[in-house]
Image (cartoon, rainbow, N blue to C red):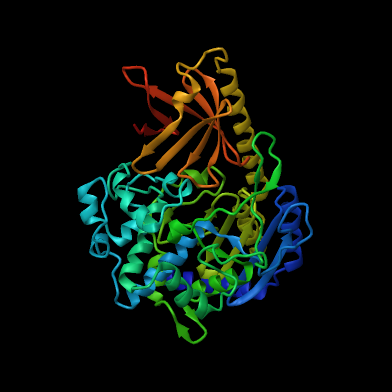
Amino acid sequence: MRTNRFLIVVSILISSSIAAHSFDAEQAKSLIETHRQEWEIPGMAVAIVHQGETLLLDGFGVKNIGKSDLIDVETQFAIASNSKTFTCAALAMAVDDGLLNWDDPVIDYLPTFRLSDPYRTLDMTIRDLVTHKTGMEGGNPAWWRTEFTRKELLSRLKYLEVSQKFRSGYYYNNLMYFTAGMVLESASGMSWDDFIQTRIFDPLGMKNSSSSIHGFDEKSNIAVPHAFHRGDDKIEPTEWYDANHVGAAASISSSAVDMATWMKFLLAKGKFGDQQLISETQIEEMQSPQTILSTQSINDIGRHVNFHAYGMGHRMYEYKGLKYVEHGGHVVTFRSHVCLIPELELGVTVLTNSETDCCEAMCYALCDLFLEQDGPDWLDIYLKKHREWRSNIKKETEKRTEERIADAPASRPLEDYAGEYTHPMYGSFYLEAKNGSLNFNFNQTHLFKGKLKHWHYDTFLLLPDLQFRDEALVSFQLDTSGAISSVKILGAVYEKKE
């Protein structure tokens, strides 16, 4: 009893100290801008909230590198996997409404739901989907190299392979979150997009947020995506990636001003104004450990935590003795990061239009600044990791070139490789022999086409037209008659159609 009283007193003193100190917003802005430039990030937007108030809300840099259109607090960025928190919040609302329960079988809402494992098909629950405990392979090419409709994606889940035992641990899976969105549609009678709009965006006044990019036009206040040019690491603008077909997993775009509102809502335990839009019970469920993760990856960067877990649309671990709730987002040329410290009612969002981990490191650095505590230089630690990543890509390219047997000819004429190759999960890979070269296209999508360059023997180098797409070696297999029978692309075998 004496120990409990002591902890309560300490907690009150800490809270009072934090509430009383003055956060230096100008110092924070200087930190953000300095490191935005050092990381060569074209544009960034940041929101910091505390106890229902906004401490910092600003845009930094430009929407498009080399141009003068500035990022502002209403500029929309793809938030990618931070969409998952919105999906879990929507499901929590449905639980509050009595439309479903977390432990209901998925098949009760989606009768056509099928996985390659019959037991998982029958026993998979909604909770399994959103806590990454399904143990099914990720199958990401099924959505990022295609334009399949949501109905088509759902019908292909039966081709996913098992990666680990059911509920044995954590295995990140976008397609299972997509499925959770489909469950919400079945239970509510509304599309996932309409539910997010009418139950979250509209009540919270999030006017600069959208569930897809389909409403964007030349007048839209949006950041231009940027990526590293293949080969020389030059940052350049590119096209927006349409993640609409995977919806609930990754398709939301938002702004700093809207994310400030979103964080306040979560930190207020589901209350906005005088409305309790999500029960406190469900907010607690979302932010409670559901799947245990190893602490190794966090300890490796000097965090030294005693627990690490995934909840529902949130990852969580320790931060200076407090629970740190976070999620990152990454989808082709955009990165975002959101962190919450519920005990302090503190939240930070960092949005960027470039592919770096700066946003995650910036969240750590801004939390340290808020607490007025010295700590590791997270931005420097992550920048070194970033440069190592880019260096390793260059080394892998050099190693591949060194191992090439340049004078080893293909076994068949170029025209023989042409045709359509199919994979039950990932769709079609089309090859056309034209003007002495092989042109490829995945599922006739405009973002996934390019050329195949002969490498050696029956191996070719896949060269996407978009320079930020990684090169990859693909290998063709022959049947017993010597005819081309299939092609292997990043471990997946596509069979040639007759």
Q: Nearer the viewer, residue 389 or 372?
A: 389
The residue sitting at 27% across, 48% down in the picture is 166
Name the quadrant containing residue 20: bottom right
Residue 427, position as x, y percentages in the image = 39, 43
Which corner quadrant holds the N terminus? bottom left
**Could you say where residue 352 lies in the image, as x and y percent from the top left?**
64, 56
Q: Percent position (x, y) of residue 399?
A: 58, 22
Q: Residue at x 72, y 52 (%)?
A: 35
Q: Residue farthest to the front?
A: 435
121 vs 303, left or right, is: left
Where is the C terminus found, in terms of image quarters? top left
- Residue 227 makes an appearance in the image: yes
Residue 428, relative to residue 87: is it above or below? above
In terms of depth relative to the viewer, which is nearer, 361 or 197? 197
Residue drawn at 28 percent across, 48 percent down: 158
Please tell me in which quadrant of the rendered image residue 110 appears: bottom left
Q: How many marks?
A: 0
- 154 vs 21, left or right, is left
Of residues 145 and 333, the one drawn nearer to the viewer in this rendering: 145
Q: Is residue 183 left or right of residue 226?
A: left
